[in-house]
Image: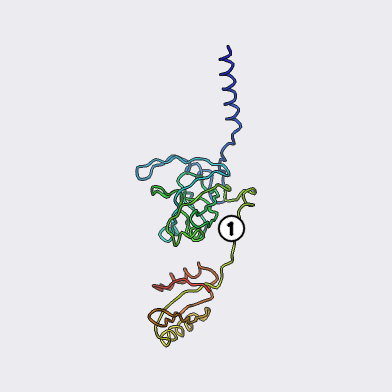
Amino acid sequence: MKRNILITIVGLSIFFSGCSQKKPHIPTASKYTSVKRHKACMKCYTVLGKRYQPTYVNIGDTMQGISSWYGPNFHGKYTSNGEIYNMYNKTAAHKTWPMDTMVRVTNLQNGKRTIVRINDRGPFVQGRIIDCSYAAGKELGLDKMGIAKVKLEVVGFAGKISKNMAKTHSINRVKLKNFGIQVGAFSKYISAKRLASKYNKLYPKYKTIIKGFDTADGKLYRVWMMGFENEKQVIDFKLFNDINGAIVVRL
């Protein structure tokens, strides 16, 4: 009799503890993703012979692993939620978390962090848990590192950061300005001046300057075009004008 009572008590305690657990957030339609697309993105799927089962999550859920980034090769293509991928937006691909989940990504190797919105599936490389857009990867330092160990934390849904989590989002927001592009480098000043004069005439909107640097082989004169508001403008200018070998600079 006592044994039966004990079993009943244990069973009730398990039942009530289970009921007290917070239910996962079920995504609804947002300005990014429809209900139909949400349902489609939460279905089990197979890639390269491996089966993945998307899961719902709660605010505060975390995960650790390797992050990578993806950019130009996917720019302009469709993502899993039906959007057109823009490498300059802070988005990311995750294999199982719901679309439009807001995730704080912390680079555990340099301390940098950012917040992204999941709008794609991937990365399908062993050990990697998230694929950040170019813009997000840049903030994390992935553009130089390639990959890094990161911590993910769910901070919101439907493309919005939870009010409770917003208070802890302490990224230093520095307005970047005065970006430029190096269009040439010469050992002779006259050659640098000639190129600077050429670009001044072609692009009067920007300021072309010559910067001298001391190297082991002597003086090196670099020709910079300055006056871009952000790095995106520089990259677009470089691609549009097909300037091979040009590098982004900032004063």
Residue at x 59%, y 60% (from the top left corner): 172
Say what secondary structure mark 1 lies in. Answer: loop
Q: Position of residue 24 (x, y in %)?
A: 56, 38
Residue at image coords 56%, 15%: 4
Q: Is residue 227 left or right of residue 47?
A: right
Q: Position of residue 230 (x, y in %)?
A: 53, 68
Q: Is residue 109 visible?
A: yes
In this rendering, is residue 171 above or below 218? above
Colour scheme in use: rainbow
**Closer to the camera, 37 or 126?**
126
Residue 148 quadrant: bottom left
Q: Position of residue 147 (x, y in %)?
A: 43, 56
Mark 1: give few (<14), some (14-19) or many (20+) Cα within 10 Å: few
Q: Is residue 126 above or below residue 231?
A: above
What is the quadrant of the N terminus in the image? top right
Q: Residue 88: horizontal and vertical position, in percent?
A: 50, 61
Q: Nearer the viewer, residue 83 or 71?
A: 71
Q: Residue furthest top?
A: 1
Furthest residue in direction front, as rendered: 216
* Residue under label 1: 171
The answer to whether residue 84 of the structure is visible from this angle is no
Q: In this rendering, is residue 114 above or below 217?
A: above
Mark 1: amino acid? Ile
Instruction: Name the residue furthest left.
Output: 49
- How many labels sit on residues? 1
